[in-house]
Amino acid sequence: MKKENELNDTLIEVKNLNKCFYSTKGIINKIHTEVRAVNNVNMSIKRGEVMGLVGESGCGKTTLGRCLIRALNPTSGDVLFKSKENGTVNLTKLSHKQLLSLRKEIQLIFQDPYSSLDPRMTVYDIISEPAKYAAGLKGEVLKRKVLDIAKKVSLDIRHLNRYPHAFSGGQRQRISIARALVTDPVFVVADEAVSALDVSVQAQILNLLQDLQSELNLTYLFITHDLSVIEHIADRITVMYLGQIIEMTATEELFQNPKHPYTEALLSAIPHADTEKNKKRIILEGDLPDPANLPSGCPFSPRCRYIKEICKTKRPELLETTPEHFVACHLSKRFKRRNLA
Amino acid sequence: MLPTHTNNRKKLNLTKQNKYILDVRNLKIHFKVDEGILKAVDGVTFRIPVGKTLGLVGESGCGKSVTAYSLLQLLPKKTGISGQSIFQPWTRDETVPEAVDLVSLPFNGKKIRNIRGGAISMIFQEPMTSFSPVHSIGNQIIEAIRLHRTRNYKHAHDIAAEMLSKVGIPDPVRMLNDYPGQLSGGMRQRAMIAMALCCNPSLLIADEPTTALDVTVQAQVLELMKSLQEELGTTMLFITHDLGVIAELADYVAVMYLGRIVEYGTVTDIIKTPRHPYTQALLKAIPRLGKTRGTRLESIEGTVPIPIDFPDMCPFFSRCSKAMKGTCNKQFPPSTEKDEHSVNCFLYCNEERKAQL
C-alpha cells in the first residue's frame, strides 16, 4: 500500500502558526480582547498518512484546520505545502489569485452534512462546482468526472439531479465527500466528518474514507473529538489544548503510553462498551479556562493533578522526549502513567 | 440548612424493591403527516424497577425521545397516542400513592402538571437551548420548586442553592443570579440536573444528557449522575445513542429500532451476548479502542427506512444479514424471553411456534 519513501515525504509543514481573534466590547470605554485560538503550532504531515487532531470543543482544532487550507488567514507563521504543479509553496504568503490554482489540491469536508450543502443546488451542481472553478473542467470531461466520483462514493447517479433535502445524513456526507474529492486533491481536511452521523452510518463513512484514501493516495488531517474514531483511522495523533499542541505521536504509542497528564485524563474519560473494564477514571476538575485569559505558565496547570511550581510560571515547550513522541510538559520525563487497565 | 435527601439507597424499603415504577404497555404514538401515518412508536412495552436505570438506545429517528416526551404529555396536541404508561409514584415513607396511567391524562390537566417536573422530571438534550435565556438560573429552578414543594420563596431559594452545590457548582448562591449565557456547557448541564432533581422526582428522564458535551465534561456529568442516583435513590430512564455511556450507567437496556423495542435485557446481557442481529451489528459498527484498529468496521448496509405507513413486519428486515424471506417480512416477530433477556426476532422462535404462525 504505502511505499517507504512516501511515508518519509513531508507534504505539509506548519511553522510557528498563530491565529488571533480580536473582539471589542463597549462603545465609549472600548475593551479590546485577544483570543489566541492557535498558539505557536509546529507540526508536519507526511504524504499518505492520516493525521488525527483531537481536543475538546473550543481548543482551536477547527481553526487550525482552516488556517492550514487558508480558509482563514493566519495571524503569523508559515504553512509549507508541496504542490504537485508549483513545487513547495508557502500558503500563508500567497495572494488570492495564486491560491485559486492551489485550491484543487487542498480540500475540506465539513462537519455538518445538513448545513454545508446549498439547499437550492442540485447534487450534480454541488459536486461539479469545485471541478468547474478550481480544476477548470468543462463539458463532457466535467460530466464524466462528476459521475465517476459519485460512483466512487456509492451515490446513485440517477439521483444526481435531486436536491440535498431528499437525502439522509449519511448520503449527504457522501455528497460532501464527493464534492471534496472531485478536484483530485492531495490533501483533505476532514473536520468532524462523521460526528453528526449515527453509529451504523458512521461505520459506512469511515470505511469509505479509508477506501478512498488508499485508492486515491490521499493525505488526511482528520479532526474529531471522538477518540475511538481517531484510534481507528489515524496513523499519528496530535492532541490540542487551548490552542496549543500538547502531545503528538503515533497512534499506538499515544494510547499505550500517553505522556501528557491531559492526554491521560482524556483517554480515561472515554466510556467503554466493554463493561468488564471497570477502570478508575481520572475526573478532571473544572472546565477549559477562558481562552482570552490564559493562565500564565502551562495552559493545563489549573486542572492538572501533578502540578509543580514551575508549571505555574513557565510555559512548557513541545519537545521530542522519545523518538517521534512530542510532549509539552515540564514533568514529561518524570511523569509515569497511572495504571489504567 | 434543610433536612432533605438524607436517606441513602441502603435504607430503601426492600418490600418495594420488586415494584416497577413505570410500566409501559403497547405504547403507540402516531403522527399524521401529508404522506400518511408516521408510526414513530409502534407498540413499545417496557418496565423500570424502582431505583434502577433503564437505558433506551437506538439511532436517531427510532422514537426514543418521542417515547420520553409522551410520558410527560409534551407532544403536539393532535398526536395519536394509545396504549398505557402506568406510573406508580414512589415515596420514601410507607404511603403508596395511587398509580396513574399517563397516557389517559389530558395534556393540560392539573394532574399531569403536578407530575411534570415534580414526580417525573426531565433533563433535556441540549443544555444550550433548554434554558430560557431571559430568566436567571435561579428563577428557573425556584419556579419548579415553588410549583411542587413549597410556596415560600426563601425556602425555595435555599433548596435551589443546596441542590446546585450538590451537583458540584462552586458558589451556588451567586450562580442563582447568573443567566444561562454566562455559563459553560458543562455548568449549564449541571444546573439542568439540579433543576430536574430539586423536587425529589421518583423518575428522572434523561434525554441524551451528555451528547452535546466534551468527553472530559461528559465523564464529570456521568460520575455526578451516578453518585446522585446512589444518594437519592432516583429511578432513571436514560436515553442515548452511545453504547459506551449505556454500559457505564444502565442496569437494563432496551434497544429500539424504528419505533419498536427489538431487544431488552440486563446491560451485561446486551453488551456481552447480544441476540438480535441489529444489536449485534450495532456493537460491531462502533470503533472500539484497541480492537478495531487496522481493520474494516462492519457497517450495517443501507439506512433506517422511513416509518410512514410501514407494513407489519420486522423493521430491520431490509438491512438484516440473517433475514429470512417469507418469514421476517410477513409480520412483526413475537418476543422470545429467556432469563429477563427478551428479543423480537424469528431466529429465536422455536420451530413449533413458527409453524403456528
Image (cartoon, rainbow, N blue to C red):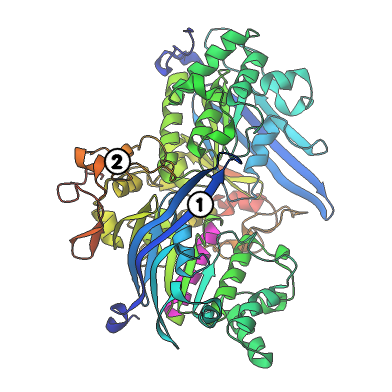
Q: At 59% from the left edge and 59% from the top edge, which residue is drawn? A: A112
Residue A115 colored in magenta in the image = no
- Dot 1 alpha-carbon crowd within 10 angstroms: few under 14, some 14 to 19, many 20 or more: few
Which residue has dot 2 on it?
Answer: A301
Residue at mark 1: chain: A
Residue B118 in picture, x, y percent from top left:
63, 19
Q: Residue at x 61, y 61 (%)?
A: A113
Q: Earlier in the sequence, mark 1 or mark 2?
A: 1
Residue at the front extreme of this rendering? A28
Q: Quadrant of the N terminus of chain A?
A: bottom left
**From mark 1 to mark 2, how far is it between C-alphas?**
25 Å
Q: The residue tagged with tag 2: helix, strand or loop?
A: helix
Q: In the rendering, at what x and y percent does residue B90 appear?
A: 57, 16
Seen at 55% across and 42% down, the residue is A30
Which stretch is magenta? Answer: A200-215
Q: Position of residue B287 (x, y in %)?
A: 42, 57
